[in-house]
Structure formats: structure tokens, C-alpha cells
């Protein structure tokens, strides 16, 4: 019983750490992965570099994005920061 009492503060500290840091991070990663899988042609996105673009053609690992009327580039899906809805400020 004494051994459990000595580990109790450590167990409580781990529980606090889990619920304040680990669990929210896992939920954020799951939501980001779902957003990446749902990208479709015509969606407006912001890349991790801060560029705003429109998706031209989603592929398996990469997406083709249009930066302006003339420039279309291929981007790794991992570099999409977020999807922007119309009317939402970046």
C-alpha cells in the first residue's frame, strides 16, 4: 500500500499531462488528417508557407494548386495548413 501511495503523485501528474497536452494534440491531428482527405477540386486552401491557392486536381500524395491565373504547381498534401471557406478571413 505504501508503494501505491508513493506513485500516486506521479500517476496524477501523468493523467493531468495526458488530458491537457496529449489528448488535444491527438484530436487536432485527427481533424487535420480528415481535412486533408476531404480536399476536393475548387477548395480554397492556405499552405504552411502562407500561400493562398485553389485546388485544381487532388491526387493521392500530392495536389495540384493554382496560385494565380497562370501558375499551377504540385504540392505535397502535408503542406496544406488549412482549408478556407468562402467569406472567412485567412
Image (tube, rainbow, N blue to C red):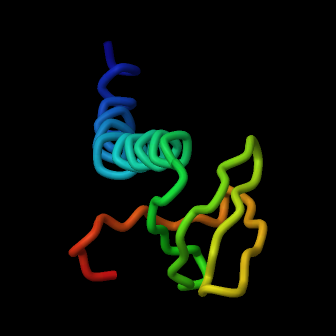
What residue do we see at 37% from left, 40% from top?
23
Residue shown at the point (57%, 62%) measured from the top left: 55
Counting from the top left corner in percent of width and height, residue 11 is at 36, 32
Residue occupying the point 71% across, 63% down? 64
Q: Is residue 89 left or right of residue 84?
A: left
* Residue that lies at the very extreme toward the left in this rendered image: 87
Q: How many marks?
A: 0
Q: Which residue lies furthest to the top in this view?
A: 1
Q: Quadrant of residue 53?
A: bottom right
Q: In which quarter of the image is the C terminus?
A: bottom left
Q: Where is residue 2 in the image (x, y as percent from the top left)?
A: 33, 20
Outermost front residue: 69
Q: Residue at x 21, y 75 (%)?
A: 87
- Seen from the viewer's position, the closer of residues 70 and 59 is 70
**Which sits in the foreground, 90 or 31?**
90
Frontmost residue, 12 versus 56: 56
Indicate the position of residue 63 as horizontal and vertical percent values.
Answer: 70, 57
Q: In which quarter of the image is the N terminus?
A: top left
Left or right relative to 5: residue 31: right
- Compared across the picture, whether 35 is left or right of 15 comes to right
Amino acid at each position: 500500500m505504501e508503494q501505491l501511495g508513493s506513485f500516486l503523485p506521479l500517476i496524477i501528474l501523468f493523467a493531468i499531462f495526458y488530458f491537457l497536452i496529449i489528448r488535444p494534440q491527438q484530436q487536432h491531428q485527427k481533424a487535420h488528417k480528415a481535412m486533408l482527405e476531404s480536399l476536393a477540386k475548387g477548395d480554397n486552401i492556405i499552405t504552411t508557407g502562407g500561400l493562398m491557392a485553389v485546388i485544381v486536381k487532388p491526387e493521392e500524395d500530392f495536389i495540384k494548386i493554382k496560385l494565380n491565373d497562370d501558375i499551377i504547381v504540385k504540392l505535397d498534401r502535408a503542406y496544406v495548413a488549412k482549408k478556407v471557406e468562402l467569406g472567412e478571413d485567412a
